[in-house]
Amino acid sequence: MERIPILRMGRLLLVTIQVDMHDRLALALQDDLTARIVKDGARGVLIDISSLDIVDSFIGRMLDTIASMSRMLGAETVVVGMRPAVAITMVELGLSLKGVRTALDVEKGMEILRNRP
Amino acid sequence: MERIPILRMGRLLLVTIQVDMHDRLALALQDDLTARIVKDGARGVLIDISSLDIVDSFIGRMLDTIASMSRMLGAETVVVGMRPAVAITMVELGLSLKGVRTALDVEKGMEILRNRP
């Protein structure tokens, strides 16, 4: 159980982050996700962080990196399920996830990705 | 991070099991899932086990219990993403998940649930 599963739903990929991220796991996720975007021809990536109590600068940076990589491969990333407390802490820490789109939940995230031009 | 997230997609709920299940977590999942089925009026539950290397009798029983509970609340359960090695081991252990439907991946599971009468 060292890898985070990537689920395919039509032309979208869904990643649910449930475990503490560490360097190796984050790198593995980047590798797996970029490979899957290409293999599946994905147009969008949804990253669900509703299990996370804390998003620190490491995870913030990882989300940003994943979004940039995905964009280069033609897929847009939407981070969904952020808890209110997490949003508060992140802004207080000066992390604003500028490069990443967000949505309240998976359904709203899917809508954003389906309606993109 | 003591709870497994439940994601809503239309009238389906998606649960991705990534961590080692223990008693307390399994009970919490049953509670959360039954509550969400009622609250969201869900018609189906997808449980993704593609991250699991091993499905022992504890997890097998849990999947069975969840399927029975969901059925009583009007939702069908489909277990998706089982690895070939897991299927082999389960049959060898005499665990056949008789009460639970299975599908290869989330997409196929969604199809089954959408086409149910």
Image (spheres, coloured by chain):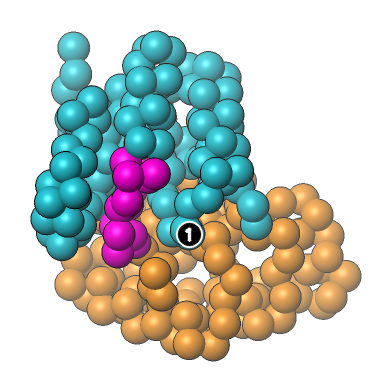
Chain colours: A orange, B cyan
Which quadrant of the structure image shows residue A31? Answer: bottom left
Is residue A37 visible in the rendered structure shown here? yes
Q: Which residues are magenta?
A: B47-60
Seen at 19% across and 18% down, the residue is B116
Q: Nearer the viewer, residue B95 or A44?
A: B95
Q: Is residue B25 above or below residue A19?
A: above
Q: Is residue B114 above or below residue A81?
A: above
* Residue on which disc 1 sits: B19
Q: Is residue B44 magenta?
A: no
Which quadrant of the structure image shows residue B15? Answer: top left
x and y percent of residue A74 in the render?
32, 73
Q: Amino acid at mark 1?
A: Val
Q: Is residue A29 above or below residue B51?
A: below
Secondary structure under badge 1?
A: loop
Is residue B12 visible in the rendered structure shown here? no
Q: Nearer the viewer, residue B63 or B8?
A: B63
Dividing the image into 4 quarters, which one contains the C terminus of chain A?
bottom left
x and y percent of residue B37 in the render?
49, 22
On screen, residue B35 versus residue B43, left or right, reads: right
**Outermost residue to the front:** B93
On screen, residue B115 versus residue A99, left or right, reads: left
Seen at 22% across and 75% down, the residue is A38
Which quadrant of the structure image shows residue A94? Answer: bottom right
x and y percent of residue B68 in the render?
36, 20
* Chain for numbered disc 1: B
How many marks can you see? 1
Dividing the image into 4 quarters, which one contains the N terminus of chain A?
bottom left
x and y percent of residue B4 in the render?
54, 48
For disc 1, the neighbor class at 10 Å (few under 14, some 14 to 19, many from 20) is some
